[in-house]
Each structure stands twice: as C-alpha cells, then as structure tokens.
C-alpha cells in the first residue's frame, strides 16, 4: 500500500544527500514531507514539523553521525516510536556509518536500507518497501 505522506527525518548537515533522495522519491510518485520544501517563510517551523508528524503515515529516518547529534532528529524518532500508527512503517536509511543505537536501542530491529552502497542500489531497496521499481532519472 502506497503512503499518504512520508515524514523525512534528517540532519540539515546531510542536505545534499537528502535533496537527492527527496527528488528521487517524488519522481517515483511518493509524497514526501521535507522541511526545506514544505515549511514556507513566516511559518513556525516547529509547529509545521509537529503537524507533519501527526499527519504523515510513514516515517523515514536518515542515519548519519550528524543525525545522532541532532536534537530534532532525536525528538522526531522518539515521537514516531511512540505512535502505534507507525508500527511497521518506520524505515531507517543508513546514509553514513554511525552508532544509531544512540538514537534508540530499538533501531537495530528495523529493516535497514543501506545507502552506504551505490545510491541507485539504496534507492531500489527503499522503493521495494512500497513495491515500486527504481527508474533512473
């Protein structure tokens, strides 16, 4: 079943990777909530993040050393892990090797999508979560 909307949790330090990821996901028809494009000037960004977390039905987490240091990533994953509606709908992406147990000891139990391999392979593995095939740009 395709998602209604995917919340993308990430560190702003990983922006280049995240923007490539968002472009690929949207090109494949996936509705992604991404703070850089969904929070408009003049809006209260923390309110917009909270609203998106309450609205989205999937949670994708970009893992990297900078994500482990992000206060907002920690808050977002804590919220998602405590919502029954995200059961089996949290998808961690390993962008860079890191000790992701520091975010939550439960993350090791999720199917990890490995983006430390070539980007196209990670994209293919991620899209399979929603039974979609990867199409290069």
Image (spheres, rainbow, N blue to C red):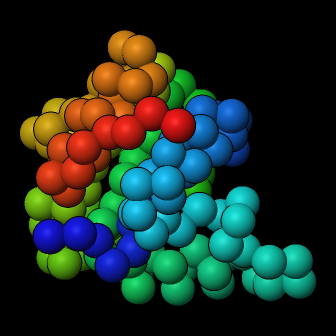
Counting labels gives 0
Seen at 49% across and 54% down, the residue is 27
x, y percent for residue 109: 10, 39
- 14 displayed left or right of 9: right
x, y percent for residue 126: 28, 41
Which quadrant of the figure has residue 103? top left
x, y percent for residue 120: 40, 25
> Quadrant where the N terminus lies?
bottom left
Vertical arrangement, residue 9 with respect to residue 113, above or below: below
Vertical arrangement, residue 99 with respect to residue 78, above or below: above
Residue 73 shows in this picture: no
Seen at 53% across and 68% down, the residue is 33
In front: 105, or 126?
126
- 75 displayed left or right of 85: right
Pick out the residue farthest to the right: 42
Residue 61 shows in this picture: yes
Vertical arrangement, residue 9 with respect to residue 86, above or below: above
């Amino acid at each position: 079943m395709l998602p209604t909307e995917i919340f993308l949790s990430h560190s702003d330090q990983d922006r280049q990777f995240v923007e490539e990821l968002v472009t690929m996901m949207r090109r494949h028809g996936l509705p992604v909530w991404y703070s850089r494009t969904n929070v408009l000037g003049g809006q209260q960004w923390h309110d917009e993040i909270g609203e998106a977390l309450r609205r989205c039905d999937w949670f994708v987490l970009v893992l990297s050393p900078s994500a482990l240091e992000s206060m907002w990533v920690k808050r977002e994953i804590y919220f998602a892990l405590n919502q029954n509606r995200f059961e089996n709908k949290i998808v961690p992406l390993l962008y860079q090797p890191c000790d992701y147990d520091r975010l939550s000891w439960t993350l090791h139990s999720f199917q990890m999508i490995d983006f430390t391999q070539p980007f196209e392979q990670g994209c293919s593995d991620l899209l399979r979560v929603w039974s979609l095939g990867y199409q290069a740009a």
